[in-house]
Amino acid sequence: MSRIKAYIPFSKGGFLTAIAYRTHILGFLVGELLFSFIMYYLWKTVFANTGGTLLGFTFSDMVVFIFLSNATRFLIHSEATYTVAEEIVEGSISMRLIKPVRLDLSLMFTDLGGTVLTFVLIFIPMLIGIEIYRYFEFGVWMISPVRILLFLFSASFSFLVNFYFDLCFGFMAFFLKNLWGFSILKQSMVNFLSGSMIPLDFLPKIFADPIKLMPFASISYTPVMIFMGKYSGTALISAVLLQVFWVIMLYVISSLIYTIAKRYLSVQGG
Amino acid sequence: MITVENAVKDFRKVIKQPGLKGSVQALFKPGYQVVHAVNDISFEVNKGEIMGFIGPNGAGKSTMIKMLTGILYPTSGNISVAGYDPQKQRQQYVQHIGVVFGQRTQLWWDLPLSETFTVLKEIYQVERREFEQRMGYLNDVLDIAPLMTSPVRTLSLGQRMRADLAAAMLHRPKVLFLDEPTIGLDVVVKDNIRKAIANMNKVDDTTIILTTHDLADIELLSHRIMMIDHGKLVYQGTLNDLKDKYGKSKKIEFVISDINQPIQQLLSDRFSQRGIECSVDQEKGTLIYDRSIPSALILKELLELVSIKDISIKESDVESIIKQIYLAGDKYE
Ligand SMILES: Nc1ncnc2c1ncn2[C@@H]1O[C@H](COP(=O)(O)OP(=O)(O)O)[C@@H](O)[C@H]1O
Ligand SMILES: [Mg+2]
């Protein structure tokens, strides 16, 4: 870790790749926005029939939730599974392994390069959009720098949880030749269980409580709830501590998987 | 510098029966076949030595290099390079080695070449003064300065190989691994690359391991060769030893000035009982004889016998020796 400087080039690489694929990102963004608007109209109908609030969520809460969850998902997105799988198939993983860097950190800093771009291109505009929406909804600016900072603090743990979770899957590519089905399964699991589709609190308590303990909630639900002011005081602290716990757990698990997996690596070609 | 003891690398290859039935079968119960890519190889390499691996395609050369560079784990056996265990201490170890895979590049494809060197400077933590000095030297041997501003994807194969070699040498590695460094290059470029490799070996006393199936690489560079075939070491030693051991014959080729004589007959009568092979095809003739017979003697007799326009004497070339060894190996399979 003392040699962070050695990893900066990876971020630069990730950033440049992300720029090269910017039309890709924008296309993706349009799709996601469309999805957010579908969710918006869906919930609008739901709320129209409930008279104001649903399980402690007002409709404007819901709007913030939908758009912020999506923006967060973008922000903490990791390419680790995809990159590892691709590099193994292609054999270019060799070129990564002959460098005096850690595999996990080199991948993480590549991701971070892309994150810089999504932060500027997607997250900031989304945040501004959300604040403007709230201004028109309530007639006053609701911007809270403290909440935003707490959100970013929690979101960095989200990034780490998501990254190491992704990495665990990526290392499966050392054993399996094809990860495709596997990664679809992973993505739908994350999307649902992380509470970025439906607020976890809307689920029956018997499901919601265990799901909240799982690493998925630490991925996007926690920072979003913090931003919305749903978590404060001890609830906030324990939610963040849970995130930290999962960062450590998943880090340890991914290291264990790697220790075993690296013996199985087989690289084709010269 | 390098010690390898009984290195073995097995790969599992999925085997699929042809047709739909095979595909379905492979889905539920895939069949495997074990390939011994490297099969019990041991050797040592000293500091400053250039060691060449030679062998046909699929012999196991690249697999050996990947184990030596810490990328692949040996199925069994021990490897130690520069005092490191390449697998267990990968991250510290690779700081001291340079690697070029002829069929890959470590250069940044879309960026100007200079970017790659800036990045490598950071990754290997090369100090600024050292970096500048090193770039000066690498430019002297590999002439990379004119390429610096070009995006890597616009470089020719030869230019790219020069740049890749420079990239592998930036951090002054103790050991340099080159997997087919001259593949696909034209003769002139090959020659430049070889000269650069020899120079780097001399200047920094860099230990160099290279693989090739181009014999000229070996003849011009290697102090010692290891011939591998089907994952096994079939010969280890210097090129001269190889010639002594296997290249038992010499060859005289000559051009006859008067083809109306019954030359084949004349030659056979004179030489055949002594185990010297004679053949004549139009005006061209050859004599193949054991290297223990002095060439001068044979030449003298030959010149007395027939009138000759032109003549040359050849050691049996490495290529044919190697062919001979591989053929012998295949017989014992
Ligand atoms: N990842 C792999 N999976 C299965 N078989 C492999 C793999 N890599 C190499 N092999 C096999 O191992 C043998 C040696 O390959 P390689 O070391 O690439 O040979 P060379 O470099 O001498 O041409 C070949 O039979 C090849 O098919
Ligand atoms: Mg090869």
Image: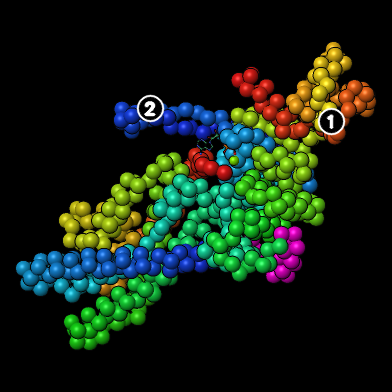
Q: Say what amino acid the circle numbered 2 marks.
A: Gln
Q: Picture quarter containing residue A209?
A: bottom left
Taking the spot 71% from the left edge, 62% from the top edge, the residue there is B143
Horizontal and vertical percent for residue B67?
61, 41
- Asked whether residue B67 appears in the rendered view, the answer is no
Q: Picture quarter containing residue B303?
A: top right
Horizontal and vertical percent for residue B203?
80, 55
Which quarter of the frame holds ligand 2?
Answer: top right
Observer-nearest of B308 and B83: B308
- Residue numbers of the magenta segment: B124-142
Q: Residues within 10 Å of mark 2 (few under 14, many from 20)?
A: some
On residue B257, the disc is 1
Observer-nearest of A130 and B314: B314
Compared across the picture, whether B150 is left or right of A40 comes to right
Observer-nearest of B137 and A98: B137
Which residue has dot 2 on it?
B17
Earlier sequence position, callout 1 versus callout 2? 2
Q: Picture quarter containing residue B262?
A: top right
Taking the spot 87% from the left edge, 16% from the top edge, the residue there is B270
Q: CA distance from mark 1 to mark 2?
A: 62 Å
Nearer mark to the viewer, of 1 and 2: 1
Chain under label 1? B
Secondary structure of the residue carrying tag 1 is loop
Horizontal and vertical percent for residue B35?
53, 30
The relative height of residue B130 versus residue B11 in the rendered view (above or below) is below
Point out the image quarter for the N terminus of chain B: top right
